[in-house]
Amino acid sequence: MQLDSHNCVLCVENVEEDIMHLFFECPFAGACWIYLDIHWDTSLDFQTMLLRARERFDSVIFTEVVIMAMWALWTHGNSIIFYDGFLSFAWWRKTFFEGMKAVTLRVQSPLKDKILAWLSSLQLSFLFFYFGPRAL
């Protein structure tokens, strides 16, 4: 398939998409990481950047969260390119939550419990942020 452009479809910066941009430098990706409370220092080499983010996140579910967030970013971009989708944080968030819930079907109980508790707290913080204390 021939694409008209190789620019990032998740932002308006007219930047040619590469891995660093798509997952770490794109403003849309940045909003997703902020929502997940994962902070990337892109001035560091890649390995150090990952280690620092993992330390700050401080949970055994870091790998699962990062992989699912990246997968949701990737599939969201594909939906825009190949299926005339549109940029939507709600779509990304829904894909992320569905993916994380699917992960809980394949992991042992202690990890499953941590993921479910984290997702629940993430959902509550989202409701509080958007709708205020009455939403809870």
Image: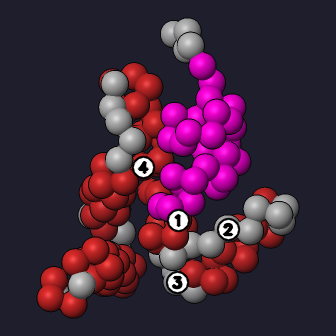
What separation in Å lies between label 3 and label 2 (alpha carbons)?
16 Å
Q: Secondary structure at mark 4?
A: helix
Residue pictured at 72% horizontal, 77% vertical? 52
Query: Residue 40 — which label?
Result: 2
Residue to which mark 3 is pinned: 59
At which x and y percent is residue 129?
Answer: 32, 79
Residue 112 is one of the magenta-drawn residues: no
- Which mark is in front, 4 or 2? 2
* Residue bounds of the magenta highlight: 5-32
The colour scheme is secondary structure
At which x and y percent is residue 24?
Answer: 64, 55
Amino acid type for the residue under numbered disc 4 = Ala
Dot 4: within a 10 Å radius of its alpha carbon, few (fewer than 14), some, or many (20 or more) residues?
A: many
Mark 1 or 4, nearer chain start? 1
Residue to which mark 1 is pinned: 33
Residue 76 falls in image quadrant? top left
Residue pictured at 62% horizontal, 72% vertical? 39
What separation in Å lies between label 4 and label 2 (alpha carbons)?
17 Å
Residue to which mark 4 is pinned: 72
